[in-house]
Image (cartoon, rainbow, N blue to C red):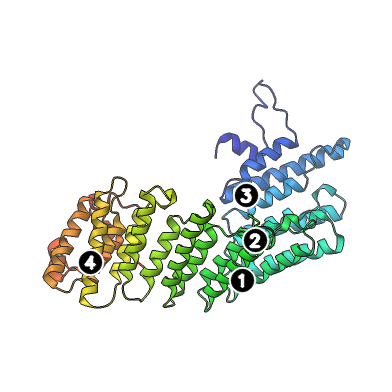
Amino acid sequence: MSQQQQQHANGRMPGGGGGGKKLRVNIRTFNWLIDSWRMNPNGVGATNAELLLLRLEEIHEREQSMNGNKAFEPDVRIFTKVINAMARSDSPGAAQRSEQMLRRMQNLYESGRNKAAKPNALTYTAVIEGYANSRLGEVAANRANDLFTELEDLYYSTRDPDLRPLQRTYHELILAWSRSGVEGAADHTEEILYHMEEQYDIDLIKMEGAKPVAANYNAVIDAHAKSGAKGATEKAERILNRMESRSKEFGDDPDVRPNVRTYNSLLNAYAKSGEQDSPYKAEEILTHMVKLYESTGNHEVQPDVTSFSTVINAWARSHNFGKAEHALKILEQMVDLYSAGENVNAQPNVIIFNSVMNACAFTIGSEYEQGRALEIAHSMFKSLESSHYMNPDDITYGTYLKVCANQVVDDNFRDSLTAAIFKKCVRDGQVGDLVMQQMQNAASRDLYIELFGSDQPLTPEEIPDHWKCNVREKTTLE
């Protein structure tokens, strides 16, 4: 924190002493300072925003008692900005503090001490966001739900447009349930979405600010994708179909029309489902995206790197025969589209190549299929080595070693290949945790002792620095 920011947080303005010019302070000064702290994602930003508000209230009370001046009276916008800072901070208890601030605003307004502090829909939304970000699980989801119900009841009892729930209010409530980890939470997000549609359909004009848009539908699809519940893929696809239907109903409305994020969320649902036909379904969706873009020219549905990598992961996680061949086919399609200039968003990266290698590592089947998986993994490695913009990383090496451990039957050949891979890995400074983990599986005891001087695993501290100098982060293979 800079000295100037600390002075601001403590309510002291620089330039007020030492014979220099005094800084003219008004409520706009506090507004600006609170805004700047609001953008700080950690607890310090929220704490200092709250300190500034307290200082502003002190000045307001002094000015009002001395001369009836209300120029420093904090209004709903300032209070809501402080709540925003709390909602987005990572400090423990931030969500509860934001709700306490809401109650304080209500008390100030209802007691007549500060009519400008009357909470509005944005205020409630900020508090709900705080609970959505809080990682408090079921507690957060229930508190968010109660706050939303309170806001909705206030709106329908007063018809005050400032209290009408907003599109973002519904969205944060969906996120609170989606992140809760509660059984059936995804179904609850779907109920919220349907309620949102119903309220909007009743009065399109008044509820324009709460119009369901693609982001809301995507969040519900995402919730189903992450739930792992039985039938999650069918439910996610049902939401996609609903989007397409509503978009047509409202004259091909672009706000509701599925986009690449929608399809990627659905692809993720299939990748995580574990159902036997999931990779085939994921591949069908990818093909649909490609054809949809070719027929409409709509860049919002054009597959991106995430689309292709998710389908490859769907194959890698499956128990189907031929997974390595299928994963390779998806990569080749991606390379062709990018190389031809038909899809600039499909530039392959090292993660994609590693995903194909992962499919090779977990390939099952005949000796031929195992040998083919080894060939594909080797071609992925050589492609990365010869690339002008990619290089093998620690995950590449670790995954290649996993391929050796799983797919090479001959002990001597496996040791020979394992040693060659490891020596290259050392030269590249890519000996990370995954590499050391897979060396225990791929290398024979004799080779392990030859390379490390012991049959015991090396601790991270024992690994020479030059072996690991280019490792970016610690990762384990799924």
Amino acid carrying mark 2 in the image: Ser
Nearer to us: label 2 or label 4: 2
Q: Specify the label residue 247 is tagged with.
A: 2
Q: CA distance from mark 1 to mark 3?
A: 24 Å
- Answer with mark 3 or mark 2, whichever residue precedes in sequence: 3
Q: Nearer the viewer, residue 38 or 411?
A: 411
- Answer with mark 4 or mark 1, whichever residue precedes in sequence: 1
Q: Which residue is mark 3?
A: 46
Q: Secondary structure at mark 3?
A: helix
Instruction: Residue at 74% x, 41% y: name it.
Output: 56
x then y, percent, for residue 99: 70, 59
Q: Quadrant of residue 74?
A: top right
x then y, percent, for residue 396: 29, 58
Nearer to us: label 3 or label 2: 2
- Answer with mark 2 or mark 4, whichever residue precedes in sequence: 2
Q: CA distance from mark 3 to mark 2?
A: 40 Å
x then y, percent, for residue 198: 74, 67
Residues tagged 2 and 1 counted as in contact (Cβ below 8 A): no
Q: CA distance from mark 3 to mark 4?
A: 53 Å
Q: Specify the label residue 374 is tagged with.
A: 4
Amino acid carrying mark 1 in the image: Glu
Residues tagged 3 and 2 counted as in contact (Cβ below 8 A): no
Q: Specify the label residue 138 is tagged with.
A: 1
Nearer to us: label 4 or label 1: 4
Q: Secondary structure at mark 4?
A: helix
Q: Is residue 361 left or right of residue 8?
A: left
x then y, percent, for residue 61: 81, 42
Amino acid carrying mark 4 in the image: Leu
Nearer to us: label 2 or label 1: 2
Q: CA distance from mark 2 to mark 1?
A: 33 Å
Can residue 459 be seen here? The reply is no
